[in-house]
Image (tube, rainbow, N blue to C red):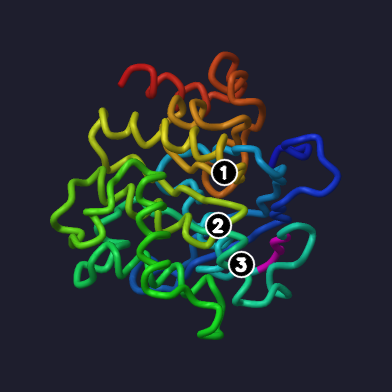
Amino acid sequence: MNVPLPIIAPITTPILEARNIVKTFPAAGAFGRAASVEALKGVSFSVGKGSALGILGESGSGKSTLARILCGLESADSGYILLDGAHRENIPREHLPHKIQMIFQNPYASLNPKLTVGLQIYEALNASAGAKSSAKHSGGALKKKAAELLGVVGLDGSALKRFPHQLSGGQRQRVAIARALAPSPEIIIADEAVSSLDVSVQAQILNLFRTLRRENRATFIFISHDALAAAYVSDDIIVMKDGSIVEAGEARDIIERPQSDYTMLLVSAAKAS
């Protein structure tokens, strides 16, 4: 059963609300019989503008499915998503990039290996500028804006001419972050965005997230199996297990005073690693 949650921040209207999200996937059962997997079992929560929410859980807990539903990459079987109080389905498609963007776990898989970094950021900038060509950036302005975005994530303009395979894992993830920032989104979802990186690079990216949140005033949703990483970048944390929320609270309380046995195991594992 889900824990009843208050709004994460004391505001009038949350920037994002998930209400009773249910998702079931078909799966092969024994002897070829049809079966199903309940990925999400009525998940509800709210996020305040400018806050950072951690979603903590092991693989199979439903957290990545939830992220994809929040972004519109998957459809829920039932329930709904509100962005600034409006049903996401009612928001014009061209406006969604300015509302919400996602950073994926594997930056090499999420970047096009056949395009330079510059072209990938240019595409994101032009797509977010609108369908009308008059709204799109000119060549010079496009390159300048792309270089500025790379500067925000700690890369210089020379990376614009490089292909993803010519970059390190940490550099590729920074490019993915820059591309996500191109539309100036109100909400950024980072789905296990540091788990595939070396420990030293993880720390750099986590610090970058904290800086971006402070300077860009974006709302962050940080999804991870690492309790300490989630607590480092989040104000509040919800803990997921088997498609349900089993615990929720302030990040410090989750780490220092976990209430459920499952949360205790996650925190202990993070501290031991």
Left or right of 163 in this view: 246: right
**Residue 271 versus residue 193 in the image, above or below:** above
- Residue 107 in picture, x, y percent from top left: 30, 54
**Residue 110 versus residue 119 in the image, above or below:** above
Q: Which residue is mark 2?
A: 184
Q: Earlier in the sequence, mark 1 or mark 2?
A: 2
Q: Quadrant of residue 207?
A: top left
Q: Is residue 1 visible?
A: no
Asked if the residues shown at circle 1 and circle 2 are in contact, with their CB atoms under 8 angstroms apart, the answer is yes
Secondary structure of residue under mark 2: loop
Is residue 81 magenta-colored?
yes
- Mark 2: give few (<14), some (14-19) or many (20+) Cα within 10 Å: some
Is residue 260 magenta-colored?
no
**Residue 226 versus residue 107 in the image, above or below:** above
Q: Quadrant of residue 161?
A: bottom left
Q: Which residue is mark 1?
A: 216
CA gap between label 3 and label 1 equals 30 Å
Q: Which residue is mark 3?
A: 76
Q: Earlier in the sequence, mark 3 or mark 2?
A: 3
Which contiguous range is marked in magenta?
78-82
* Circle on res. 10: none
Left or right of 82 in this view: 217: left
Q: Is residue 53 visible?
A: yes
Residue for point 39% across, 23% down? 270
Say what amino acid the circle numbered 3 marks. Answer: Ala
Outermost residue, right side: 12
- Mark 1: give few (<14), some (14-19) or many (20+) Cα within 10 Å: some
Outermost residue, top side: 256
